[in-house]
Every structure is written in structure tokens, then in C-alpha cells.
């Protein structure tokens, strides 16, 4: 698989590889893996939130706004 990045991003990747004594391909593989793990986590959280909302487990806008206002004053 080919992976294309901007020259600016490639320069940053090269600098990180040199600084950490790691291979650029290793860093790219780690970055893609972390992205996939994050996306799986995010999709689970969104799905769980949708399920909770479907069950009626929600907080009214006014309650959230009141809670946020209280935090801002602290």
C-alpha cells in the first residue's frame, strides 16, 4: 500500500523518526493503528449514547446549561 503525505508532514515524520531512533514506517503503522483503535472506541461510545437516549436516559438541555453555568462560576 502506498501512503502519500505532504512534504511538510513528511519532514515532521522524518524529524520524529530521527529524534526517537525509530523507522518512519514503524511510526506510520503505529499512527494508523492508534487511529483505528480510537475510531473503534468512539463508535462504541456513540452507539452506547444512542442506545441510552433510545431508552430515555437523557438530561434536559436546561439542566446541562445550569450545570455548565455553575461550573463557570467556580
Image (cartoon, rainbow, N blue to C red):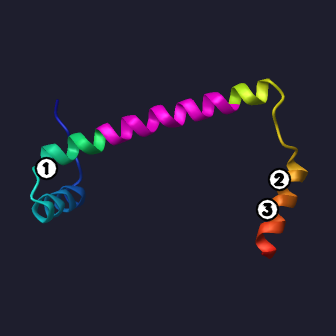
Tell me if label 3 and label 1 are in contact, CB under 8 Å: no
Marks 1 and 2, how far apart at CA: 45 Å
Identify the residue at horizontal 68%, vertical 33% (top origin): 49
- Quick one: label 1 or label 2, which is nearer the N terminus? 1
Q: Is residue 64 above or below residue 32?
A: below
- Quick one: label 3 or label 1, which is nearer the N terminus? 1
Tell me if label 3 and label 2 are in contact, CB under 8 Å: yes
The local secondary structure at tag 3 comes to helix
Identify the residue at horizontal 71%, vertical 25% (top origin): 51
Q: Residues within 10 Å of mark 2 (few under 14, many from 20)?
A: few
Residue 53 shows up from this direction: yes
Q: Which residue is mark 1?
A: 24
Marks 3 and 1, how far apart at CA: 43 Å
Q: Residue furthest bottom?
A: 73
Identify the residue at horizontal 24%, vertical 57% (top origin): 9
Q: Position of residue 16 (x, y in %)?
A: 18, 61
Magenta range: 33-49
Q: Is residue 70 above or below residue 41?
A: below
The tag on residue 64 is 2
Between circles 1 and 2, the one closer to the viewer is 2
The tag on residue 70 is none
Amino acid at each position: 500500500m502506498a501512503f502519500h503525505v505532504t512534504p511538510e508532514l513528511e519532514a515532521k515524520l522524518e524529524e520524529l523518526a530521527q529524534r526517537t531512533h525509530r523507522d518512519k514506517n514503524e511510526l506510520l503503522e503505529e499512527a494508523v493503528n492508534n487511529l483505528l483503535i480510537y475510531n473503534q472506541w468512539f463508535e462504541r461510545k456513540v452507539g452506547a449514547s444512542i442506545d441510552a437516549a433510545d431508552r430515555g436516559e437523557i438530561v434536559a438541555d436546561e439542566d446541562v446549561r445550569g450545570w455548565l453555568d455553575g461550573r463557570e462560576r467556580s
